[in-house]
Image (spheres, rainbow, N blue to C red):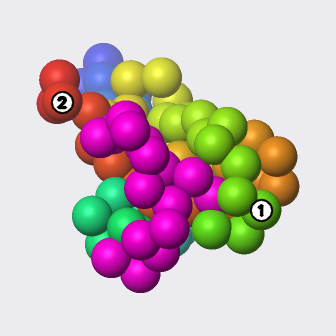
Amino acid sequence: MQFLIGLGIIVAVGIFYYYVLYSPAQQDDWDKLPTLPEYLDKHPECKTSDDENAKCYSCGSDKVIFQPLTTHLDPRYKHICLSCNRILFKSKSIMS
């Protein structure tokens, strides 16, 4: 009986990780986003003095924030314009 309970807990943790922390739907969306170099190749006017950031191609704002894809432990980030809420490009944490 204890084996079945332990197995159930392991399965539940695995399902939680896959659907909540990994999130295949969000991973697909993240995969479609350009990296910063790809974004700047497409929008060279968005280059800034900061080598790790860029301006928004839509509104020209330089207020771009990054947000983890799922939780604060997720090394995948999406960069979002604070003015018009467009998702611009992706990056990965250097600590991953």
State whether residue 9 appears in this view. yes
Q: Is 4 on the left-hand or right-hand side of 62?
A: left
Amino acid marked by disc 1: Cys
Most common SS among magenta residues: loop
Q: Which residue is under mark 2?
A: 94
Residue under the image location 38 percent in, 39 percent down: 49
User: Which of labels 2 and 1 is toward the front?
Assistant: 1
Please provide the residue range marked out in magenta.
41-56
* Residue 74 location (% of width, % of height): 38, 33
Residue 46 vertical placement versus 63 (above, below): below
* Residue 46 location (% of width, % of height): 51, 61
- Callout 2–callout 1 Cβ contact below 8 Å: no
Quarter of the image for residue 42 reads bottom left
Q: Residues within 10 Å of mark 2 (few under 14, many from 20)?
A: few
Residue under the image location 63 percent in, 68 percent down: 57
Residue under the image location 82 percent in, 46 percent down: 83
Depth order, front residue of 96/81: 81
Amino acid marked by disc 2: Ile
Residue 29 vertical placement versus 75 (above, below): below
Depth order, front residue of 95/26: 95
Q: Residue furthest bottom?
A: 42
Question: Of helix, strand and loop, which one carries label 2?
Answer: loop
Residue under the image location 63 percent in, 58 percent down: 56
Q: Which residue is under mark 1?
A: 59
* Residue 2 location (% of width, % of height): 30, 18
Question: Of helix, strand and loop, which one carries label 1?
Answer: loop
The numbered mark, 2 or 1, whose residue comes first in the sequence reads 1
Q: Residues within 10 Å of mark 1 (few under 14, many from 20)?
A: few
Alpha carbon of mark 2 to alpha carbon of mark 1: how far?
28 Å
Q: Quadrant of the C terminus?
A: top left
